[in-house]
Image (spheres, rainbow, N blue to C red):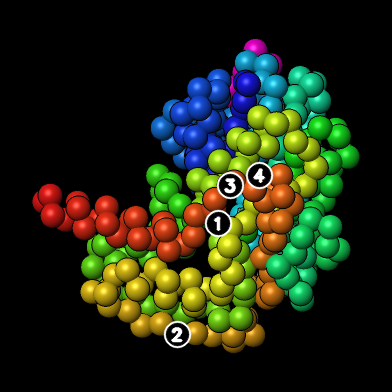
Amino acid sequence: MKILIIGASGLVGNNCLRYFKQKDWNCVGTYFSYEAANTVFFDTLNLDNENNFNVTQFKPNVIVHCGALTHVDYCEQNEAESYEKTVVSTKNVITIANELQAKLVFISTDYVFDGENGPYDEEANVRPISVYGKHKLEAEQAVLAANAQNLVLRITNVYGDEERGKNFVSRIIDQIFEQQKLTLRLPIDQYATPINAADIARCMYLLLRDNKSGIYNIAGTDYMNRVQLALTILKYFPEAEYELIPQTTTQIAAPAARPLQGGLKNKKFMSEYPDFRFNTVDDYVNHKSIMLDDMEDAE
Ligand SMILES: NC(=O)c1ccc[n+]([C@@H]2O[C@H](COP(=O)([O-])OP(=O)(O)OC[C@H]3O[C@@H](n4cnc5c(N)ncnc54)[C@H](OP(=O)(O)O)[C@@H]3O)[C@@H](O)[C@H]2O)c1
């Protein structure tokens, strides 16, 4: 398997890059503005950029597209830029995949749903309520229409190991480790299915190995809101100093609407891979807290 991962300096792409390399797949990962270890430059918005990695020469048989503008409120306020960075960029990647006859994997979200009755399965009716959600839906539909072999993985609330440690769970753990006092104003009414990026990589590996296509939800067994997620982390760090201020989404009044009862059901994936075990947030944070204790003991 020869794989190009676009957006391998990010959370999901980098976990895929590391896992696929461990599995001895011939894999190249790209960055755009942050040069993560073992990545090469590629800009999906300017295919003629002379600094772009030479994809034609590499000739991957799979392209995993993780490049995106993921800041939901920024997208709401900058609709044209969101369209460029999600829809146009994906159409550019579709063009490359078609030229090379490569299978394309697109990473989508539960924001394609309205959040009135999640968690959702793959067949549920889509109705995005934000600019980000609308653009992700348009991009995933373009990917599915381009080639029956293409794959769309829907995910939400991703956490896990990443160089920049910018995801919600990593940021809380890092601040605790730096002995900062945390002030957490968090929505109590937004429910989702948090997923470890390492599990997304493990699932994608199996789906690619078995040449699956169509839409798959990649979600673990946790179903929680942000306050519950924060408390799950904090219980492993009894020494942490924090103030937790639960708020409703209405009180927060962010620019973009959120699917409140969001999240995804993994029934389809589990029916095809019944022995697969997803990590929980507890598994991840417990492991992290033990590692950090060991690091402190060693100092
Ligand atoms: N994180 C979540 O909770 C979540 C939830 C649902 C869906 N998703 C989807 O999962 C995918 C990956 O998200 P993530 O969390 O891994 O995001 P991320 O950490 O922000 O990574 C985004 C990646 O896109 C790259 N990128 C940005 N603009 C680019 C361009 N013009 N050309 C090429 N690459 C570009 C970034 O490169 P640089 O950083 O080097 O600039 C980075 O590697 C996205 O499609 C996102 O919508 C994520």
How far is the residue under mark 2 from the one under mark 1? Answer: 24 Å
In the rendered structure, which amino acid carries the disc numbered 1? Ile
Q: Is residue 192 left or right of residue 137?
A: left
Indicate the secondary structure of the residue bearing disc 3.
loop
For discs 2 and 1, the disc positioned in front in the rendered view: 1
Q: From the image, tell me which residue sits under label 4.
A: 273
Q: Is residue 54 magenta?
A: yes
Q: Quadrant of residue 130?
A: bottom right
Q: Are marks 1 and 3 in contact (CB under 8 Å)?
A: no
Q: Work out whether residue 252 or residue 142 is closer to the camera in this orientation and state it.
A: 142
- Examine the rendered structure and indicate whether residue 166 appears above or below residue 115: above
Q: Which mark is residue 245?
A: 2
Q: Quadrant of residue 93?
A: top right
Q: Are marks 2 and 1 in contact (CB under 8 Å)?
A: no
How far is the residue under mark 2 from the one under mark 4? Answer: 40 Å
Q: Is residue 40 visible?
A: no
Q: Work out whether residue 224 or residue 115 is closer to the camera in this orientation and state it.
A: 224
Q: Residues within 10 Å of mark 1 (few under 14, many from 20)?
A: many
Residue furthest top in the image? 57
Residue 32, percent across and down?
55, 37
In the rendered structure, which amino acid carries the disc numbered 3? Phe
Residue 82, percent across and down?
70, 53
Q: Magenta segment, which residues? A: 52-57
